[in-house]
């Protein structure tokens, strides 16, 4: 069944020798649409009985609108903890939805690119995903589903204010578009802060993901639009696409600069990360993700001997608590997870190394290119 | 307040009662509520919510009158205080009930003040209906009756998509054409 699908490989699997894997600076895209039913109290204010009824109504309609034989409503009440954790780690649901418990649920439309949360902050939250820079694709999926759903349910909508939401920050289009980007080069070159300030001045929100909460440690960031009223959806998407491409370009240039000007720093950064991952016996999710991020940079720059990007992708998912327990087929407490996570990392990365000559080769590749 | 039915016990529940073809809203006690009339759950929870909100405010004693500067949403019972604390509204009507607050928030948060994005299909139809009605009035006022007739037919089609007004009054011929 859907929830037992094997991990979907994102990259091309085992790379061809001598060829660098495509850098995944822009990792994924997401479009979220917030909608509410007319004549019903918003989820936070509604009674449990009201929410249960809304879940029933919206769930049935969403399953119909999904037009997929495997679409089903998954209520939060009585759901399997580990399975829900896995869903949350894949961004299909949020922690708020899990916490809501009775009267909350989501509809899994049978395709990994779409999920519909019910009674989270709003009655309906449509979420569409795409790999890489796929904002337009994600918008198409979300928009098409929304159009089908609106034929089945009366939406709360105002001519002047647009789609009405529980929080005024979401009215209008109700759309939050975001991209996940990987920026280790900009961090190493010291340009990261400037880029973030620039994005914020353009009214984009930048949030560090997976680090110790602050932008200072992690290398992964989520860029999303701020306002939702007074702009149309296509304009926001086009604008976010443009800035993301510009940021990705800056990241590419930063990586080149760093290899050219401070190759030892690169070597040190990647080697340290590998060393910890290969030797730790207890490690938490966020710490593991930070080091894996440095390893990813190493692979993409070509400084790791016999690199296996498919293994890296698997680890990036499997270090998360839900995925880890799901893979091991065991329920574990946090300490046990820290231990087993470290075991998994040592096993998988045991023989990986950063070679001096690979660093020199990467630099040469860069210098030759620039001479052209 | 006292139960509106027995006038003896305290009123605790709001009910809706039909009598003589009319629906009345009453505040009654537990006993009288059990005796008849439908408990309107919305009203009940609205009353609860107002009481809860009142109790939740330290400075406000139970049963205090809500002042003009502390509006309550008539549909869902959300109070301004509760809204500010939760930073979330109770229902769509709150946008009108707390207009001043929401307008200020909107000005701060958003680039524009008017929705220019996607519109649900139902709203498109409603918008077009309103436009047609205005056009119809103008056509009648300027005595353009043929145009008015067309607009009237278009409006009729919109409100009942199955039937369309016949432009010609006579039989169209066919199997049941009159001899």
Image: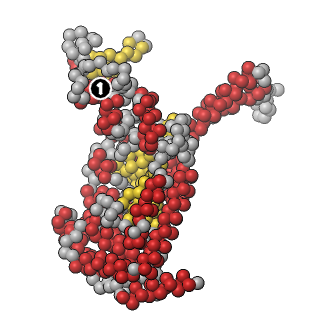
**Residue at coordinates 53% horizontally, 52% vertically from top-left?**
A236
A329 over A139 or under it: above or below: below
Of residues A17 and A249, the one nearer the viewer is A249
Residue B23 pos. (x, y %):
40, 16
**Residue at coordinates 28% horizontally, 48% vertically from top-left?**
A99
Question: Which quadrant of the rendered structure holds the C terminus of chain B?
Answer: top right
Most extreme residue toward the top is: B7
Which residue corresponds to mark 1? B50
Most extreme residue toward the bottom is: A357
Q: Is residue A110 left or right of residue B169?
A: left
Of residues B4 and B110, the one nearer the viewer is B110
Q: Secondary structure at mark 1?
A: helix
Residue B148 pos. (x, y %):
74, 25
Residue A167 pos. (x, y %):
40, 41
**Residue at coordinates 36% horizontally, 54% vertically from top-left?**
A93
Dividing the picture into quadrants, the one containing residue A35 is: top left
The answer to whether residue A43 is visible is: yes
**Residue at coordinates 53% horizontally, 41% vertically from top-left?**
B112
A255 over A360 or under it: above or below: above
Of residues B65 and A99, the one nearer the viewer is B65
């Amino acid at each position: 069944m859907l929830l037992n699908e094997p991990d979907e490989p994102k990259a091309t699997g085992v790379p061809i020798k001598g060829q660098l894997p495509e850098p995944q600076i822009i990792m994924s895209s997401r479009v979220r649409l917030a909608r509410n039913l007319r004549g019903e109290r918003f989820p936070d204010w509604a009674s449990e009985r009201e929410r249960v009824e809304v879940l029933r109504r919206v769930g049935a309609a969403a399953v119909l609108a999904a037009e997929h034989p495997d679409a089903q409503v998954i209520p939060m009440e009585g759901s399997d903890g580990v399975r829900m954790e896995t869903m949350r780690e894949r961004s299909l649901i949020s922690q708020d939805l899990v916490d809501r418990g009775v009267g909350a649920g989501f509809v899994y439309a049978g395709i990994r690119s779409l999920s519909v949360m019910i009674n989270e902050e709003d009655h309906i939250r449509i979420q569409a995903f795409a790999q890489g820079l796929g904002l337009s694709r994600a918008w198409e999926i979300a928009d098409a589903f929304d159009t089908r759903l609106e034929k089945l349910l009366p939406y709360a909508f105002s001519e002047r204010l647009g789609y009405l939401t529980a929080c005024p920050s979401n009215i209008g289009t109700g759309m939050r578009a975001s991209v996940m980007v990987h920026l280790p080069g900009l961090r190493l070159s010291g340009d990261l802060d400037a880029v973030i300030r620039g994005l914020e001045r353009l009214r984009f929100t930048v949030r560090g993901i997976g680090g110790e909460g602050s932008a200072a440690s992690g290398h992964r960031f989520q860029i999303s639009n701020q306002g939702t009223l007074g702009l149309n959806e296509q304009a926001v998407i086009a604008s976010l696409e443009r800035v993301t491409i510009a940021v990705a370009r800056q990241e590419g240039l930063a990586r080149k600069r760093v290899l050219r000007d401070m190759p030892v720093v690169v070597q040190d950064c990647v080697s340290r990360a590998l060393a910890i991952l290969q030797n730790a016996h207890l490690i938490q999710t966020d710490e593991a993700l930070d080091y894996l991020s440095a390893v990813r940079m190493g692979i993409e720059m070509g400084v790791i001997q016999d690199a296996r990007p498919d293994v890296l992708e698997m680890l990036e998912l499997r270090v998360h608590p839900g995925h880890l327990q799901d893979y091991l087929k065991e329920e574990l407490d946090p300490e046990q997870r820290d231990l087993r996570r470290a075991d998994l990392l040592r096993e998988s990365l045991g023989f990986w190394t950063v070679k001096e000559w690979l660093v020199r080769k990467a630099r040469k590749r860069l210098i030759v290119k620039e001479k052209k | 307040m006292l139960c509106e039915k027995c006038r003896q016990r305290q009123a605790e529940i709001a009910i809706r009662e039909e009598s003589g073809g009319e629906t009345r809203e009453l505040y009654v006690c537990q006993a009288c509520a059990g005796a008849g009339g439908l408990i309107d759950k919305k009203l009940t929870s609205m009353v609860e919510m107002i009481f809860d909100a009142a109790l939740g405010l330290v400075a406000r004693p139970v049963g205090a009158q809500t002042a003009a500067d502390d509006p309550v949403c008539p549909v869902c019972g959300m109070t301004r205080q509760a809204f500010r604390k939760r930073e979330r509204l109770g229902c769509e009507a709150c946008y009108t009930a707390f207009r001043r607050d929401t307008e200020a928030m909107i000005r701060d948060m958003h680039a524009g003040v008017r929705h220019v994005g996607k519109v649900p299909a139902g709203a498109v139809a409603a918008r077009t209906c309103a436009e047609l009605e205005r056009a119809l009035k103008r056509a009648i006022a300027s005595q353009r009756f043929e145009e008015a007739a067309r607009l009237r037919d278009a409006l009729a089609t919109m409100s009942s998509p199955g039937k369309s007004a016949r432009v010609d009054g006579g039989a169209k011929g066919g199997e049941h054409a009159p001899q």
